[in-house]
Amino acid sequence: MTRRERLMVATQKGRADKLPFFHYWRHSQIGWAERECRNRGMGVNWARPSYVIKMHGTEISEKQAVISGQAVIRRTYSTPVGSIYLLEKREPGVGQWHAQRSWRDVSPWQIERLIKKPEDYKVLKYIVENTEYIADYFPIEQAMDWLGEEGVVIDHLPHSPMQMLMIDWIGSEQGRFFFHLADYPDLVEELYRAISKSREPLYEIAAKSPAAIVLCGDNIDGVLVNPKLFEKYFIPQYEKQAKVLHHHGKLMAVHTDGRLKALKDLIAKTPIDIIEAFHPPPMGDLSVGEALSVWKDKVIWIGFPGSVYHLGPEATKRHALNMLREAGTGERLAVAMSTENLVSNENLRMLTAVLEKADLPLTREKIDRIEKSLA
């Protein structure tokens, strides 16, 4: 099987010849180790958007500023109902490397969000209601042409409505989002509904894109998104999105990279097809075996824990072997070398050395042979 075929068969709940494993382009180094690992079976996944946006009635300006001795970018959004701004820290390399990350894999970081006070909500609501989504399939078509059978191109959507507020526009640092939800519930709810309404055309665009898989770029974690919030604000959005995507034969993935034990039963009730970026312990709190058991109708794309990489190649090998021992026969699984961070050449080669030998169906004897071959 090709790398693309292997991943798609597993994602459609069939049995591939081997356990699929891949690297995301946005985190992947380009060079001798990456080439070696791809020659040994590692695929490449590329997430690209199917749309561009046009903000009507909004002017955007940027200027450099120094705040408390720190160089930042101040981006201002000016509308007929007022202006809002954010402050963004950009480490060296941002704009010159993958996915707007720095040389050291640190994304641009907002040190002040768009929403700071109650008056800011009406401005952002105006922007949301006057944002137009326009189909643009060229980025996906180009990536598919370049990638061929080396991997899968995924249609990448932004955070779902409430996570736009939690992560992008209000922020959860020092509990900011939760204070806003408690102090200004009507404003939060009104903006949430406006975002939800504005996104409806976007789902139609994604449903008609050339990509077979559409990723909702959330960051689901049971501490940030407690069960009450998940049930009220997230499940309805996933159902709305899935209804459109499934009608057009698309598979729906959601970025669920956090601690999920508190949400596992609710996640089981969602129409999500792919639990993407699932992190087992030590970063998550749900094992691979338990996840497969509770999500019997879902496919799991595991994000190999970055904290293990910090312990070096031997720890990476041990963790990978233990992960295989929890994986049952290996169906409904794929492994991403990383979903968030850079991976050293040494760790990339070690994880490849384990996964390239993971023929399906997995058995205890096969895994023991892999371990002996790497002793």
Image (cartoon, helix red, strand yellow):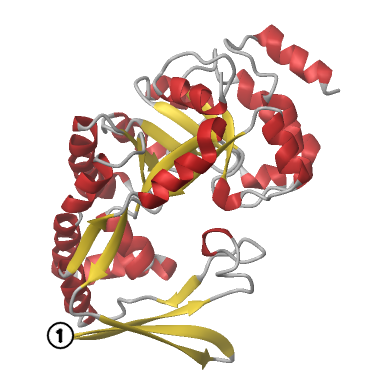
Give the residue at x 48% y 40%: 145
Give the residue at x 65% y 27%: 41
Q: x, y (%) of residue 9?
A: 45, 20
Tell me the SS state at disc 1: loop
Q: x, y (%) of residue 369?
A: 76, 12
Q: Is residue 293 above or below residue 277?
A: above
- Residue farthest to the right, as pictured: 375
* Total marks placed: 1
Q: Residues within 10 Å of mark 1 (few under 14, many from 20)?
A: some
Give the residue at x 28% y 64%: 53
Instruction: Judge whether residue 13 can be spotted in this image.
Output: yes
Q: x, y (%) of residue 144?
A: 46, 40
For residue 346, what is the image quadrant?
Answer: top right
Q: Please give left or right for residue 215 compared with residue 44 in the image.
A: left
User: In this figure, which residue is indicated by the disc labeled 1?
Assistant: 81
For residue 352, what is the image quadrant?
Answer: top right
Q: x, y (%) of residue 205?
A: 23, 47
Q: Nearer the viewer, residue 267 or 77?
A: 77
For residue 241, what is the image quadrant?
Answer: top left
Instruction: Judge whether residue 45 can be spotted in this image.
Output: no
Q: Is residue 97 above or below residue 257?
A: below
Q: Please give left or right for residue 322 compared with residue 172 in the image.
A: right
Q: Nearer the viewer, residue 163 or 25?
A: 25
Q: Is residue 178 above or below residue 253?
A: below
What quarter of the picture does the C terminus occupy? top right
Give the residue at x 35% y 70%: 176
